[in-house]
Image: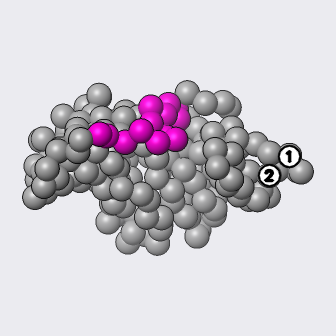
Amino acid sequence: MILSGKKVSDFFEEPVAKINPAGVDLVPRGVFRIPENATAFLKGNERGFIIEGRFVEQRLGKERVVPDSEGFYNLTPGVYEIVLQKVKIPLNATGFCHSRTSLVRLGIVKAESAVWDSGYEGEGMQIFHFPSNARIHKDEAWVQFVAFSNSEEAGKGYSGYYQGEKLSQRNP
């Protein structure tokens, strides 16, 4: 069963942008450009990029994009990661994050990401591809987060590599 937006809003530490009947809209806490000149690298717990011949951990290999003086992200064609506010998925639910239709209608593509497992806690992220330039206000929601009730509570929650991640606190 899909959970109400009101119930889903309780999963988040801070207020959400909008509570919908079946989920919540979320505004990015951070926008990062994935480097074009890098080679993605994944081997066990080594996750990042090879940039100019050296390994750079994934959290450090992306360039932060800051809003201009009018509050807009000015995005050139490329791939971007957005960081969302802290979430705590209860053991009796599973979450999914979808692109807002407004972005899709403008040709902006969100990569599908993994399931937000029961017990996951941290600042989730999503990946977007911009085939053309875009100007998006910093207060605009990019995704809608929905959650489903599990048929039974998970005995043990998520405990993988990304548990407890704090993506918005990275450099630069």
Crowding near the residue tagged with mark 1, few <14, some 14–19, many ≥20 C-alpha atoms within 10 Å:
few
Asked whether the residues under the numbered discs 1 and 2 touch, taking CB atoms below 8 Å apart as contact, a structural biologist would say yes
The amino acid marked with disc number 2 is Ile
The magenta-colored residue range is: 156-168
**128 w.r.t. 163: above or below:** below
Mark number displayed over residue 143: none
- Image quadrant assignment for residue 154: top left
Task: State the residue lying farthest toward the right.
Answer: 53
Image location (x, y in percent) of residue 165? 49, 34
The front one of 102 and 121 is: 121
Answer with the quarter of the image where residue 75 lies: bottom right
Place residue 19 in its image quadrant. Answer: top left
Q: Nearer the viewer, residue 29 or 122?
A: 122
Q: Is residue 91 visible?
A: yes
Residue visible at 38% across and 71% down in the picture: 105
Q: CA distance from mark 1 to mark 2?
A: 5 Å
| Above or below 54: residue 115 | below
Q: Nearer the viewer, residue 126 or 40?
A: 40
**In terms of secondary structure, where does tag 2 sit?**
strand
Secondary structure under badge 1? strand
Q: Residue, x 60% and y 59% (percent of image)?
A: 79
**Image disc number at residue 50:** 2
- The amino acid on which the numbered mark 1 sits, given as a three-letter code, is Arg
In the rendered image, the quadrant that contains the N terminus is: bottom left
Q: Position of residue 21 (x, y in %)?
A: 11, 53
Left or right, residue 107 beside residue 88: right
Is 1 included in the stretch rendered in magenta?
no
Tell me where residue 44 appears, x and y as whole percent: 64, 49
- How packed mark 2 is, by other alpha carbons closer than 10 Å (few <14, some 14-19, many 20 or more), is some
Q: Disc 1 marks which residue?
A: 54
Q: Residue at x 68, y 45 (%)?
A: 46
